[in-house]
Image (cartoon, rainbow, N blue to C red):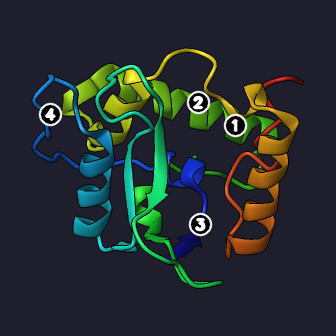
């Protein structure tokens, strides 16, 4: 299992089919759907957090991770099994550029499948997001936080190697 403490990496997960949870205003509760999927897939989501919109009553506000009670230093927030990640298959001949292209191709295929994808909760979350949400569009401070979290708290490196810059190259 890969231990992740990054919201971004959590949201870069893929899913099996789950019932869609819809709020009273018609908004899909992607945080709850993704959390249930991770737990049903053998992962862990700390009960001291919730994933929700920043402004719960505004279906256009962004999702975030919020502590509902104190979280101790080094306490696990997420544990995500590798089988819940979209990972480009590699051969000895593949280089990083080929793997990134394969990963993008696989993600596009899953997005086209939509609700029929084995990763439907993640795909549906991605499809619901406005453009410009990639880490390369984040502030310098946001990029530093993501890079620090990935370096310090990820046991097995995840692609791409430079998650905040690869789209800019």
Q: Mark 3 or mark 2: which comes first in sequence?
A: 3
Q: Nearer the observer, disc 2 or disc 4?
A: 4
**3D distance between C-alphas at marks 4 and 3:** 27 Å
Q: Nearer the viewer, residue 154 or 63?
A: 63
Q: Are marks 1 and 4 in contact (CB under 8 Å)?
A: no
Residue appearing at x 37%, y 22% in the figure: 128
Q: Quadrant of residue 148?
A: bottom right
**3D distance between C-alphas at marks 1 and 2:** 6 Å
140 to 157, vertically: above or below: above
**3D distance between C-alphas at marks 1 and 4:** 36 Å
Q: Nearer the observer, disc 4 or disc 3?
A: 4
Q: Nearer the viewer, residue 138 or 101?
A: 138
**3D distance between C-alphas at marks 3 and 2:** 23 Å
Res 104 label = 2
Where is residue 59? Give x, y as percent: 32, 23
Neighbor class of circle 2 (other Cα within 10 Å; few <14, some 14-19, many 20+) is some
Q: Mark 1 or mark 3: which comes first in sequence?
A: 3
Q: Which residue, given by chain and number where applicable, does mark 4 sit on? A: 23
Residue at disc 1, secondary structure: helix
Q: Which residue, given by chain and number where applicable, does mark 1 sit on? A: 100
Q: Quadrant of the C terminus?
A: top right
Residue appearing at x 37%, y 33% in the figure: 125
**3D distance between C-alphas at marks 1 and 3:** 23 Å
Residue appearing at x 26%, y 50% in the figure: 32
Residue appearing at x 54%, y 27% in the figure: 105
Res 18 label = none
Q: Nearer the viewer, residue 102 or 54?
A: 54
Q: Are marks 4 and 3 in contact (CB under 8 Å)?
A: no
Neighbor class of circle 4 (other Cα within 10 Å; few <14, some 14-19, many 20+) is few
Neighbor class of circle 1 (other Cα within 10 Å; few <14, some 14-19, many 20+) is some
Q: Which residue, given by chain and number where applicable, does mark 3 sit on? A: 5
């Amino acid at each position: 299992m890969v231990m992740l403490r990054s919201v971004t990496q959590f949201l870069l997960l893929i899913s099996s089919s789950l019932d869609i949870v819809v709020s009273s205003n018609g908004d899909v509760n992607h945080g709850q759907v993704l959390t249930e999927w991770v737990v049903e897939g053998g992962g862990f989501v700390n009960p001291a957090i919730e994933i929700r919109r920043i402004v719960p009553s505004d279906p256009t506000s962004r999702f975030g991770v919020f502590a509902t009670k104190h979280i101790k230093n080094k306490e696990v927030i997420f544990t995500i099994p590798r089988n819940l990640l979209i990972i480009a298959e590699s051969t000895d001949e593949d280089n990083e550029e080929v793997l990134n292209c394969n990963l993008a191709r696989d993600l596009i295929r899953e997005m086209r499948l939509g609700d029929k994808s084995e990763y439907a909760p993640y795909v549906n979350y991605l499809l619901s997001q406005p453009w410009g949400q990639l880490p390369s569009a984040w502030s310098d401070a946001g990029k530093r936080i993501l890079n620090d979290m990935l370096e310090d708290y990820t046991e097995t490196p995840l692609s791409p190697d430079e998650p905040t810059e690869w789209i800019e190259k």
